[in-house]
Image (cartoon, rainbow, N blue to C red):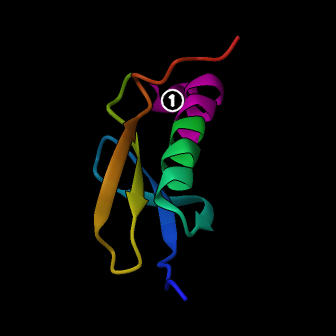
Amino acid sequence: MLETTSLHFNLVDQNGAAHPTGQPVSDRDQALAVAKRLAIDIAETRQEDHGNGCFVSVIDGNGGGIHREGVDSAEKSG
């Protein structure tokens, strides 16, 4: 059986402060898709976090960052 490590998400603001967001997932591909969706949602709904260099960080079970999805570069839907 393949052991999986839970991946978590943080919204990192312009001051470098991390705010947990989203739900943990166990698959890297799913985590990247969730990070992209979270960045789009934040860009669309939280104007205070847009244009400030904020990003969604994917964090592994050991606390290491494995991906960053920028809020400023997120493509808005529709």
The C terminus lies in quadrant: top right
Query: Is 49 drawn above or below residue 51 in the view shown?
Result: below
Q: Magenta stretch: dominant SS?
A: helix
Instruction: Work out whether residue 71 or residue 36 is closer to the camera in this orientation and state it.
Output: 36
> Is residue 47 within the magenta segment?
yes
Quarter of the view holding residue 47: top right
Q: Position of residue 54 (x, y in %)?
A: 38, 37
Amino acid carrying mark 1 in the image: Glu
- Name the residue at 57% across, 53% down: 30
> Is residue 39 within the magenta segment?
yes
- Name the residue at 28% across, 69% down: 64
Query: Is 61 drawn above or below residue 22 in the view shown?
Result: below
Quarter of the view holding residue 70: top left
Q: Is residue 57 left or right of residue 76?
A: left
Q: Is residue 32 left or right of residue 22?
A: left
- Name the residue at 55% across, 43% down: 33
From which residue to which does the magenta span run?
A: 38-50
